């Protein structure tokens, strides 16, 4: 499928490349391909770019380029959206249930499943990292088993520990750092999503790997884990 | 080094250097008022993006442990140096040579909401972290003290009624004609629930077009973008804003007016005035030119 995007000015120092308005791996791959092309071209006057589900926001220096020039450069960039870039696969250890996953039972009850089934279904998924945002290292993931979809908690918790793995509606995610939140928490990872650099990158595939409490503590204390 | 004696209300060590980690969800940690931070650095002969202090509503009390030149820009705060029991007034927008042991102090800002302190050599490891009493901040190699001053201030501080120029929003089509008219009519009042991430405004709700609710697929955003929440109230993104947002963007404050936005106080009434993209970029070129020729060596 040919890549099609339209360009719009986002303020006076950015151009936003808009791809079809949907959450799909195909569209997101095109966005990341254009992002890679911009990175590789090292265009003088281009400052930064931020990929998302279906847009690539390109910031330029308006002292060096007009909007027309920036847009023209973007349109003429050679890029290959067809190319299936080999995204990395990242394995994230998760200790499910118990004190680390206080809402596991509720998610199970909502989906008419046993807690064990919730864990095996959640850990069986392959989750695409569509984008990172909201907090440093926070992944917007696709690919949650629809049977696990559970509405947000009616009353958000005041504090959710960093590393908590949760479900909200049709989304699953990981809290990079402690914060208030309304997600249903089903487990916790000992790995840090962000510590000076991001564990995940847009386009990665994330897998959750169930581990015991003992293994959790070991990894937390600096034990080996092959992501 | 400089030693923080009293942090005032809230003081951060900031640098204008772009890290470009937004794609990993990491917001910029630069100065909220980039222009005034840059001018303070230029006054003491630093690179534009050297580390400096950004303080809210008052200047922090601090002691110079080395002899360095320093300069203050932003809200006027009656700054003075305490030296051997004497108070020496410090002009805003002018580099002054501090001697070892001098203490800097000041009052509440008379206008604006932020003041910038640059020290020759720059503050090292300034990554947006708050400073606390007792902190000793390392300075870079001091060059021969540059003592410069501003001949004219290229930036005006906003008062309790302000106008911010904007360009048309990427999602202007998500709003009804009446909603857009309400937005441009204003005014919108800066809420006290504003911070370095953004200014929350309250005013007439900017109504959405039929079938729209202000939600979009989360996408990249920049300081200056104005999102409108589902309740119709605008939020102006500032330097520490989240890197992606899921609300429709009704307009974008032009780069030349971001310094004014950074200096707004809670309670200020703001109107948004639409300008074209070429006008916006011309305004920034003009401001950049003025900033380039407003500083001269003191004779």
Image (cartoon, rainbow, N blue to C red):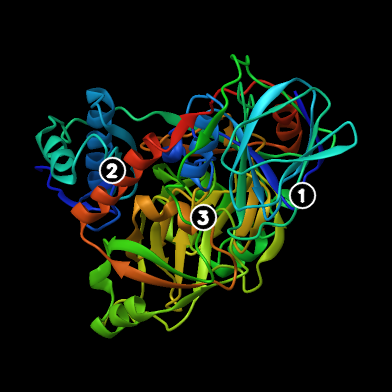
Query: Which residue is the extreme one toward the front?
Result: B299
Pointers 3 and 1 within a single chain: yes
Total numbered labels: 3
* Distance in Å between CA atoms under marks 1 and 2: 35 Å
Image spot of residue A33 (x, y percent): 24, 34
* Residue B165 point in image, percent of width and height: 34, 62
Q: Nearer the viewer, mark 1 or mark 2?
A: 2
What residue is shown with label 1?
A: B8
For image coordinates 63% across by 26% down, the residue present is B125
Mark carried by residue B262: 3
Precedes in sequence: disc 3 or disc 1 = 1
In what element is the residue under mark 3? helix
Callouts 1 and 2 in the same chain: yes
Q: Nearer the viewer, residue B203 or B78?
A: B78
Marks 3 & 2, CB-CB < 8 Å contact: no
Return the disc, 3 or 2, that comes first in the chain's sequence.
3
């Amino acid at each position: 499928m040919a890549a099609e995007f339209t360009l719009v000015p986002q303020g006076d120092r950015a151009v936003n490349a808009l791809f079809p308005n949907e959450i799909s791996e195909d569209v997101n791959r095109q966005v990341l391909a254009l992002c890679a092309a911009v990175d590789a071209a090292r265009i003088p006057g281009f400052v930064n770019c931020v990929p998302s589900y279906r847009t690539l926001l390109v910031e330029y220096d308006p002292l060096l380029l007009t909007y027309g020039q920036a847009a023209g450069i973007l349109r003429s960039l050679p890029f290959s959206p067809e190319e299936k870039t080999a995204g990395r696969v990242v394995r994230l250890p998760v200790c499910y249930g118990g004190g680390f996953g206080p809402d596991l039972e509720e998610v199970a009850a909502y989906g008419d499943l046993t807690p064990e089934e919730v864990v095996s279904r959640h850990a069986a998924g392959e989750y695409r990292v569509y984008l990172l945002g909201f907090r440093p290292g926070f992944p917007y993931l696709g690919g949650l088993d629809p049977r696990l979809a559970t509405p947000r908690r009616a009353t958000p918790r005041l504090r959710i520990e960093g590393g908590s793995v949760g479900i909200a509606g049709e989304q699953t995610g990981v809290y990079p750092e402690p914060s208030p939140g309304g997600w249903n928490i089903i487990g916790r990872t000992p790995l840090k999503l962000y510590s000076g650099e991001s564990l995940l990158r847009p386009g990665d595939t994330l897998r959750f790997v169930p581990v015991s409490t003992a293994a959790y503590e070991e990894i937390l204390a600096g034990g080996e884990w092959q992501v | 080094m400089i030693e923080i004696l009293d942090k005032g209300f809230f003081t951060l060590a900031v640098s204008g250097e772009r890290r470009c980690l937004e794609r990993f969800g990491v917001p910029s940690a630069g100065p909220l008022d980039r222009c005034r931070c840059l001018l303070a650095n230029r006054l003491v002969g630093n690179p534009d993006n050297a580390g400096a202090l950004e303080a809210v509503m008052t200047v922090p009390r601090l002691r110079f442990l080395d002899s360095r030149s320093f300069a203050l820009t932003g809200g006027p705060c009656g700054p003075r140096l305490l030296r051997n029991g004497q108070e020496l007034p410090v002009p805003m927008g002018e580099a002054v040579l501090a001697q070892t042991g001098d203490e800097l102090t000041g009052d509440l800002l008379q206008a604006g909401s932020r003041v910038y302190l640059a020290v020759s050599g720059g503050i090292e490891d300034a990554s947006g972290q708050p400073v606390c009493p007792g902190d000793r901040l390392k300075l870079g190699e001091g060059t021969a003290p540059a003592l410069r001053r501003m001949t004219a201030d290229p930036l005006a501080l906003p008062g309790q009624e302000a106008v911010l120029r904007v360009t048309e929003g990427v999602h202007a089509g998500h709003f009804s004609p009446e909603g857009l008219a309400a937005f441009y009519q204003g005014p919108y009042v800066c809420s006290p629930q504003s911070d370095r991430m953004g200014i929350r405004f309250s005013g007439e709700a900017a109504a959405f077009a039929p079938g729209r609710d202000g939600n979009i697929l989360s996408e990249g955003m920049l300081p200056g973008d104005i999102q409108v929440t589902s309740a119709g109230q605008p939020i102006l993104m500032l330097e520490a804003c989240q890197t992606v947002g899921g609300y429709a963007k009704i307009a974008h404050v032009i780069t030349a007016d971001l310094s004014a936005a950074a200096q707004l106080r809670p309670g200020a009434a703001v109107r948004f005035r639409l300008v074209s993209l070429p006008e916006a970029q011309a305004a920034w070129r003009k401001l950049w030119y003025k900033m380039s020729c407003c500083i001269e060596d003191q004779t």
